[in-house]
Image (cartoon, rainbow, N blue to C red):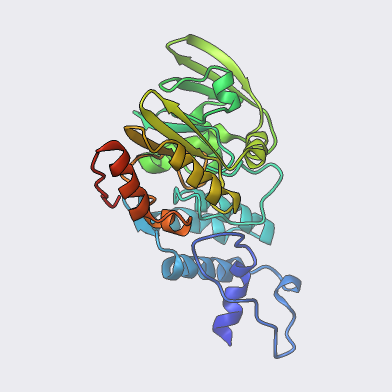
């Protein structure tokens, strides 16, 4: 009984994460419910760390040192007096795992936009600098002329390193390259529903661009067709628009494949899909398992492609 009640504090703070927490238990001994008790930072912290260590699959991986993250935030957690302060600290800490699936809620109106769902820019960390590595197609960033290779000098009047420290709670010098790049992505996406200003330097010289909020990008994407397809010479391109959970994706994807069956190669662009990251897949079909679920059958598509093109398709798991 004690074990279940200990876990109820953090269970109330997790909105969406790759961890599991039991349902909140009803107090059987007449004790006051958690919400009515004075906040116990030490107990909540122990529960949170226990949850991460036992149930979070990516606690340690290249570029992410879970024990070091815990050690960095433990002293701050011990000094907190309220549940709201504790949730805010956990949100900062969670971002240090550089995992968009690990989210701590509830979110605040002045919190960051959800990355990568609402983001339109992907950054790379090069010698500590924030460099644009990719720009989402059909986004406001494209229309404003943001280019791959542009160096970001300021985000809303603040140096990128300072913006990262705000969101991750640690100096950039304490972060790995993986963490720093993730922090740059969060900083570039900005605050929910708030327009952004970037100062850039690159092939087009130094310039300042004004971008609409990343929230507008997310809503526009949700309203777009499930996917689009086109030919570029003898190469076919299918771009999914955050639609893997939509029923109309099935028929649209099948039709797109049929219409491009005579092309020499096919590219599947997943950059507009959460967790698609910056993925553009050649017809090497890292979506092989998914295609069967879409009612296509990978083997059927493979054979039709080979018959139409004379090319051999080799399936290599990615």
Residue at the image point whose x is 56% and y is 37% from the top: 119
Image position of 279 with respect to 158: above or below: below
* Tally of numbered discs: 0
Q: Which residue sits furthest top?
A: 205
**Residue 260 appears in view:** yes
| Foreground of the two, 205 or 3 | 205
Instruction: Report which quarter residue 210 is drawn in.
Output: top right
Image position of 15 with respect to 156: above or below: below
Query: Residue 98 at x, y = what percent?
Result: 44, 48
Query: Residue 250 at x, y = what percent?
Result: 53, 51
Query: Residue 225 at x, y = what percent?
Result: 61, 39
| In this rendering, position of residue 212 left or right of residue 179 | right
Quadrant location of the N terminus in the rendered image: bottom right
Query: Residue 162 at x, y = what percent?
Result: 52, 32
Image position of 167 with respect to 318: above or below: above
Q: Which residue sits furthest bottom?
A: 29
Residue at the image point whose x is 49% and y is 59% from the top: 74
Image position of 33 with respect to 256: above or below: below
| Foreground of the two, 227 or 158 | 227
**Residue 285 appears in view:** no
| Foreground of the two, 117 or 155 | 117
| In this rendering, position of residue 173 left or right of residue 306 | right
Instruction: Report which quarter residue 68 is drawn in.
Output: bottom left
């Amino acid at each position: 009984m004690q074990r279940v009640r200990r876990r109820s504090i953090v269970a109330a703070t997790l909105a969406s994460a790759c961890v599991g927490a039991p349902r909140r238990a009803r107090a059987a001994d007449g004790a006051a419910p958690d919400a009515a008790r004075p906040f116990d930072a030490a107990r909540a912290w122990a529960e949170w760390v226990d949850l991460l260590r036992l149930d979070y699959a990516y606690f340690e991986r290249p570029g992410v040192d879970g024990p070091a993250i815990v050690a960095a935030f433990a002293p701050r957690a011990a000094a907190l007096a309220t549940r709201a302060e504790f949730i805010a600290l956990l949100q900062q800490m969670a971002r240090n795992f550089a995992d968009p699936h690990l989210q701590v809620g509830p979110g605040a109106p002045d919190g960051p936009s959800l990355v990568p769902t609402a983001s339109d820019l992907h950054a790379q960390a090069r010698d500590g600098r924030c460099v644009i590595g990719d720009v989402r197609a059909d986004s406001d960033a494209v229309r404003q002329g943001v280019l791959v290779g542009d160096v970001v000098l300021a985000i809303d009047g603040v140096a990128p390193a300072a913006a990262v420290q705000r969101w991750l709670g640690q100096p950039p010098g304490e972060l790995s390259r993986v963490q720093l790049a993730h922090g740059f992505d969060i900083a570039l996406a900005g605050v929910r529903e708030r327009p952004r200003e970037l100062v850039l330097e690159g092939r087009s010289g130094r310039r300042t661009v004004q971008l609409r909020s990343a929230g507008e990008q997310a809503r526009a994407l949700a309203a777009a067709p499930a996917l689009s397809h086109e030919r570029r010479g003898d190469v076919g391109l299918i771009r999914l628009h955050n639609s893997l959970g939509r029923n109309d994706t099935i028929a649209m994807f099948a039709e797109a494949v049929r219409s491009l069956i005579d092309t020499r190669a096919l590219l599947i662009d997943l950059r507009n899909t959460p967790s698609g990251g910056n993925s553009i897949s050649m017809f090497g079909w890292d979506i092989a398992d998914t295609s069967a679920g879409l009612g296509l059958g990978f083997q059927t598509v493979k054979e039709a492609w080979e018959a139409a093109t004379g090319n051999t398709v080799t399936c290599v798991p990615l």
